[in-house]
Image (tube, rainbow, N blue to C red):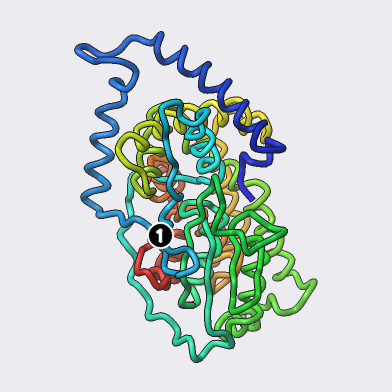
Amino acid sequence: ATPVASCFRNTRTMRNAVFALCRRATRQVFSAPCSAGSRGVLAPSANAFAHHGQILTARQFAVSAVSSPRAAGVTAFGSFRVTGSFRSMGVVTATAAIATSVVATTLATTTTAETKAAVPIDSLPFKEVTLYQYDVCPFCNKVKAMLDFHGVPYDVVEVNPLTKSEMKFSKEYSKVPVLVVDETQINNSSEIMRWLELNVPSAQSLKKKNGTAKQNSKVSEKELKWMSWVDDRFVHVVTPNIYRTWTEAFASFDYITNRGNFNFFERQAVKLSGAVSMYLISQNVLKKRHGIVDERAELYKDLNQWTDAAVGTSAFCGGAAPNLADLAVFGVLRAVKTFQTFEDAMAECPDAKRWYKRMEHEVGGASRSDGVEN
């Protein structure tokens, strides 16, 4: 369930497309003039990298850790080996696989939400909850928003997007997110949210309170409409915003590689190849596929549509309390809260900013067992 992966029928097709895009971008970048005293292609972006690195250090962004023994030794985005020939540019393929599921990050304008006390696992009708995810995948962040909101304690397994070795237990489904509750496997972000709504006591109570327990009611139809809008529209508008310019594309992969398990040389290769490939994919595939001309204008329009038509005069789409649609939109936005896209959107759409602040208060901090904030 990633924005770009559906454009390619198999890994070989994706790899060949990325090779072509990178060759084209490399010609463009090498032919561009460098700043005074600079050396080579990376010089124009060096200051941007340094500045973003200071921001990350100041805010002490944590690297997602595996908290389940089923994925011992695997950390954010896995480990990609680089040989003398880059193993036929496997790094490029790996970064494209990472990026296809990323709604990445921009300059943080919100403080960390106060962490809620996790619900005692003994009070729940299950004993163990494990989320298989990519850390900044928008669909995975929908699920994390739901779990955090209800204070459900959960373990996180970071899936290597190239090998997906952590997903070997899932014979017929290899996408993320996947939630394993005791021995039950639930696939697809919206299905996971629905399952949790039916099985977590606080979610059951809220469902009755906000009226969505009644099927085919106006309230439940409204919730379903806006949940579908998130998956079919909103995610695909947010993604090209992250890679709108070369500067934003490089800043995005600077963050991604800092969250991942890369050595210095792997990190530099992934930053370049990933930023180049995703900038061109966003410009040449995503925008055309979804009829987007000006990605920022489309994002602002969609956020205003959300607050005007979905939230309206209420505090939330769900009325006095968030419903599943609120949690889905919040999850997608929370995934991008550390980048320029988020800062611009909150400045341009004040109603969306006020709604986001209310949601941030309602959801609270992460209830995941490794202590890492989402």
Give the residue at x 45% y 59%.
Answer: 356
Give the residue at x 56% y 52%.
Answer: 164
- The answer to whether residue 351 of the structure is visible from this angle is no
Residue of label 1: 73
- The answer to whether residue 271 of the structure is visible from this angle is yes
Report the amino acid beneath label 1.
Answer: Gly
Of the 4 image quadrants, the one containing the C terminus is: bottom left
Where in the figure is residue 35, as x and y percent of width and height? 26, 14
Give the residue at x 59% y 59%.
Answer: 167
Where in the figure is residue 139, as x and y percent of width and height? 57, 55
- In the figure, is residue 183 to the left or right of 106? right
Q: Quadrant of residue 309?
A: bottom right
Q: Residue furthest right?
A: 216
Where in the figure is residue 296, as x and y percent of width and height? 50, 35
- In the figure, is residue 166 to the left or right of 250? right
Q: Measured along the vertical axis of the image, is residue 286 above or below residue 317?
A: above
Where in the figure is residue 176, as x and y percent of width and height? 59, 56
Mark 1 is surrounded, within 10 Å at the Cα level, by few (under 14), some (14 to 19) or many (20 or more) other residues, namely few
Q: Residue furthest front?
A: 84
Residue 310 vs residue 229, the one in the foreground: 229
Residue 233 vs residue 349, the one in the foreground: 233
